[in-house]
Image (cartoon, grey):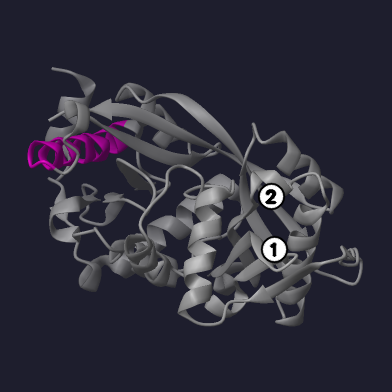
């Protein structure tokens, strides 16, 4: 008998995750994980609530909670997806007392559920899909579980932050440009179109998506705040966008840069600095004391820009992936 099967016999079976009954338990697991892995709490209860009820997530079939031997939860997993991304993300949460075997049991459920979805025709092209899992450098048990389940080729990201204080550089003046908030549906359509043309962290830039699909995802993204989103215009044409959310407002009083970018044809003109500094100053005026983002470590131009404007690396995360089949 393998160690994993022995562990499975010694612990209770996975149970369906009911957001109405289990959100507080999941949030406590996440808080404990953040403290152990990052030394601070980043995740808010609102973010957990939003992720468990996001479009395309059915917790009854796509999420599981793992009780420990005493009945208290030690881990959870749920599948999620986002506009512009093919495949699924396994949101894996392991408490401080969880083991790599616990994580492997939860990942095994996620893989089996993806196989069921593929068999049902959700992603018929090629007969296979991709499952990813995003974890921090300090989540040792989760990383060991991912390796044991065949997740490989982790893609590295930095979590970066900047303090919004009196030392902020001034917004540069670039003739013919303006950074303005969104105003109405047409601006939302423009925002979406620019997002599909520009590079940005996480979801944006992966693949083009339809406006209606994107709008449903965007409106239900935890912490979304249209008042904080911005369009960058040059000579009357929208060439950049910034999606700023309150994902970390309750935990860190920080604005979170969900997505930001300018279209490739307008780079090397200082527009990235203009856009980023504009939203940094706007967040400071709203009372935020910090700003946080996640950036691909291979994106050297973005890293150089952030560092030049005072951003500091706080942690490393890795995106682990594996192919799943029906």
- Mark 1 vs 2: CB contact within 8 A: no
Q: Which residues are magenta?
A: 101-121
Q: Position of residue 161 (x, y in %)?
A: 71, 55
Left or right: where does residue 262 sit relative to residue 220?
Answer: right
Label 2: how many Cα within 10 Å (few below 14, some 14–19, many 20+): many
Residue 123 found in image quarter: top left
Residue at coordinates 14% horizontally, 37% vertically from top-left? 118
Above or below residue 210? Residue 189 is: below
Residue at coordinates 42% horizontally, 43% vertically from top-left? 207
Of residues 182 and 247, the one nearer the viewer is 182
Q: Can I make out residue 157 in this image?
A: yes
Q: Which residue is mark 1?
A: 291
SS at circle 2? strand
Q: Is residue 102 magenta?
A: yes
SS at circle 1? strand
Above or below residue 177? Residue 207 is: above
Q: What is the number of the mark on residue 233?
A: none
Q: Position of residue 48 (x, y in %)?
A: 38, 64
Q: What is the number of the mark on residue 160?
A: 2
Q: Quadrant of the C terminus?
A: top left
Of residues 20 and 193, the one nearer the viewer is 193
Q: Between disc 1 and disc 2, whose residue precedes?
A: 2
Residue at coordinates 24% horizontally, 58% vertically from top-left? 56
């Amino acid at each position: 008998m393998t160690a994993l099967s022995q562990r499975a016999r010694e612990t209770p079976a996975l149970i369906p995750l009911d957001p109405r009954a289990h959100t507080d338990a999941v949030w406590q697991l996440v808080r404990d994980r953040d403290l152990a892995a990052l030394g601070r709490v980043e995740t808010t209860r609102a973010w957990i609530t939003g992720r468990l009820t996001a479009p395309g997530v059915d917790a009854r079939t796509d999420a599981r909670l793992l009780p420990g031997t005493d009945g208290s939860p030690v881990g959870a997993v749920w599948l999620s997806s986002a506009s512009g991304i093919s495949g699924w993300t396994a949101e894996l949460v392991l408490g401080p007392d969880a083991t790599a075997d616990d994580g492997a049991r939860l990942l095994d459920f996620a893989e089996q559920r993806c196989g069921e979805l593929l068999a049902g025709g959700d992603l018929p092209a090629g007969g296979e899909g991709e499952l990813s899992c995003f974890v921090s450098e300090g989540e040792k048990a989760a990383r060991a579980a991912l390796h044991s389940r065949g997740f490989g080729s982790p893609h590295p990201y930095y979590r970066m932050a900047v303090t919004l204080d009196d030392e902020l550089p001034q917004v540069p003046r670039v003739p013919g440009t303006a950074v303005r908030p969104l105003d109405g549906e047409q601006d939302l359509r423009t925002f979406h179109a620019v997002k599909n043309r520009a590079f940005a962290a996480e979801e944006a830039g992966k693949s083009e998506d339809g406006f209606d699909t994107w709008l449903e995802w965007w409106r239900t993204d935890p912490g979304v705040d249209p008042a904080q989103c911005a369009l960058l215009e040059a000579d009357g044409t929208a060439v950049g966008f910034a999606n700023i959310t309150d994902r970390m407002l309750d935990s860190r009083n920080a604005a979170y840069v969900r997505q930001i970018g300018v279209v490739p044809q307008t780079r090397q003109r200082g527009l990235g600095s203009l856009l980023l500094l504009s939203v940094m100053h706007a967040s400071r005026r709203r009372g935020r004391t910090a700003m946080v983002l996640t950036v691909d470590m291979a994106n050297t131009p973005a890293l150089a820009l952030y560092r030049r404007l005072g951003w500091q690396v706080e942690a490393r995360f890795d995106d682990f992936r594996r192919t799943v089949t029906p």
